[in-house]
Amino acid sequence: MWRWILAVAYAWPALGATPPDLNPIFRALYNFDFASAHALLDREIAARPDDSLPYAVRASAYLFSELDRLQILESEFFADDKRIIEKKKLKPDAKVRERLFQAISDSQQRAMAVLARDPNDKSALFSMCVTNGVLSDYTALVERRQMRSFSSVRRSNGYAVRLLKVDPKFYDAYLTTGISEYLIGSMPFFLRWFVRVDGVEGSKDQAIKNLQLVATEGRYLGPFARILLGIVYLREKKPREAQQTLEGLAREFPSNPLLRKELAKMAAQLPR
């Protein structure tokens, strides 16, 4: 589930000599200001039409706005497995779906062209990691095809592992490996035999460590890692940790209505 900023970014050279400054775009996304995010992306893409990463961020923006519209980002959804796997059909926006898949295609075509020349290009590897993560989230959460989504999970995890071999300090990539660990670790034992991801043991403890690393060190995905940590804490019956995480996010992104709503809901449920 997939893709955004941290207030203190690590060194720009991680993505190349002259990487784009995407922080304002990610900040708009985390504040649920999708119109501003797309306007900023239009300018970034016009300036760098061959760069795969802005297209990957655009796919993330379409995904996040659709998850919000369909109320999939509500805490109860992620805390209750029955809601995730229920067969009740949602009504995806056909135009958003078309634009999301076009953004994925635009990003992956550019990233693969770069990787054909340089298999270790970090920006291209990250773009492939992000777009496959977006695809897995859309397939599982919007289209409700959970098992089919695991092919994208495997691809996303594979690109993350490749990226971390090239640069172990590319901390954002640990979000993908952390998600993979938690997904596999949350499955019934018999299903783990059928759903295997290379290098993933299904350790929830390792998943939390990876997410915590991204939360503190990630360049783009720090806030998203904290959102996921809040969800994990709820699932693991740690409401106080979840509340503290949400409080920090609400202070950092005061225009995000979902964070305020979830924080108020959690405060009402906790004993005083």
Image (tube, grey):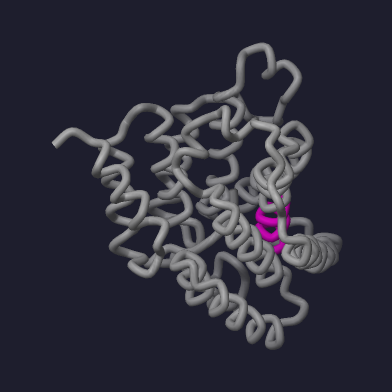
Left or right of 252 in this view: 112: right
Verify whether residue 130 appears in magenta.
Answer: yes
Left or right of 35 in this view: 146: right
Residue at 38% across / 67% down in the picture?
7
Left or right of 10 in this view: 243: left
Image position, residue 138 (x, y; %): 69, 49
Residue at 36% across / 49% down in the picture?
262
Q: 19 above or below 63?
A: below
Q: Image quadrant for the C terminus? A: top left
Question: Start and end of the magenta stretch?
Answer: 124-132
Residue at 64% across / 86% down in the picture?
43
Image position, residue 127 (x, y; %): 69, 60
- Could you say which is closer to the camera, residue 1 or residue 51? 1
- Could you say which is closer to the camera, residue 161 or residue 33? 33
- Could you say which is closer to the camera, residue 128 or residue 199? 128
**Residue 159 seen in this snapshot:** no
**Residue 239 seen in this snapshot:** yes
Image quarter for residue 147?
top right
Q: State whether the magenta stretch is mostly helix, strand or loop.
A: helix
Q: Residue furthest top?
A: 190
